[in-house]
Image: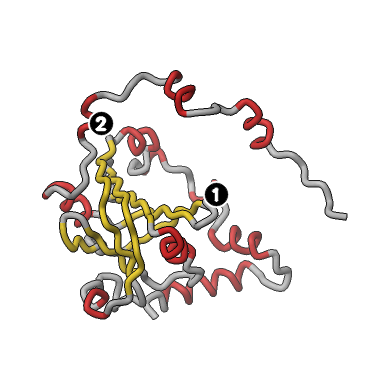
Amino acid sequence: MTPAVAASAFDSLCLDAVPDQETLRLAYELPSDAAVRKQMTELTDQTRQLIDCSSLVLVASVDAEGNCDVTPRGGPAGFVAVLDARTVAIPDATGNKRLDTLQNVIATGRAGLLFIIPGRTTTLRVNGRACVSTRPELLSQLTAVGKPPASALVLGIEEVYPHCPKALLRSGAWKPEQWLPADAQPTSAEVTLAQLRMPELTIADIEQAEADSLKYRYE
């Protein structure tokens, strides 16, 4: 027999969850005119500059069954190429090779991006159609991460929305005096070791693997 799975807080909280969009709207005031008007379908000179300054972008995708994923992509400022006012391309630098994001994009043809600029509080949301390209003439342009990537995520822009800085201001993300001390969180190696559940491995093994991964990150 399959062992019973204990109910989680999610199961309890969803018993009386908000049932529809109309009920949700009743809990909030209407958005301001500016919050609606500043959504565009293509990049301006200013939003192009934001992308050129960004060294970190979060990529949201979903598979054919509706399972969601958000993953970070990073590189030197401007590593995401603006091909024209309605198209950007993200080089796929060497990572864990799971290909979660790329497989999702192939399955659904959609993706969402959130561009972040370290030390700044403005973020830029870009959503739209997406595909995975291995076209050599494109990849040869995307060498900011060290060499031409194996593939690139290409996004056809349908929505451009600059967010106000409130979230990053509230989080204190760029204020070192508000950061937690280093020992307040488990290390990357400790987290990975617990996730792997392989008794034969040690923290030292994981730390060495992480060091090697960073050393050879462009291979």
x, y percentage for residue 146?
A: 29, 75
Which residue extends farthest right? Answer: 1
Residue occupying the point 30% across, 46% down: 125
Tell me the quarter of the picture where residue 178 sits: top left
User: How does the figure colour the protein chain or chains?
Assistant: secondary structure
Residue beneath disc 1: 185
x, y percentage for residue 144?
A: 25, 70
Judged left or right of residue 79, residue 211 is right
The N terminus lies in quadrant: bottom right
Q: CA distance from mark 2 to mark 1?
A: 39 Å
21 vs 196: above or below: above
Label 2: few (<14), some (14–19) or many (≥20) C-alpha neighbours in 10 Å: few
x, y percentage for residue 192?
A: 59, 62
Tell me the quarter of the picture where residue 54 sits: bottom left
Residue occupying the point 32% across, 33% down: 166
Residue occupying the point 44% across, 62% down: 101
Label 1: few (<14), some (14–19) or many (≥20) C-alpha neighbours in 10 Å: few
- Residue in the foreground of this view, choosing between 127 and 192: 127
Residue occupying the point 40% across, 21% down: 28
x, y percentage for residue 27?
A: 45, 19
Name the residue type under label 1.
Gln
Residue beneath disc 2: 36
Secondary structure under tag 2 reads: helix
- Residue in the foreground of this view, choosing between 27 and 121: 27
Looking at the image, is mark 2 or mark 1 nearer the viewer?
A: 2
Name the residue type under label 2.
Val
Secondary structure under tag 1 reads: loop
The C terminus lies in quadrant: bottom left
Disc 2 or 1, which lies upstream in sequence?
A: 2
Tell me the quarter of the picture where residue 6 sits: top right
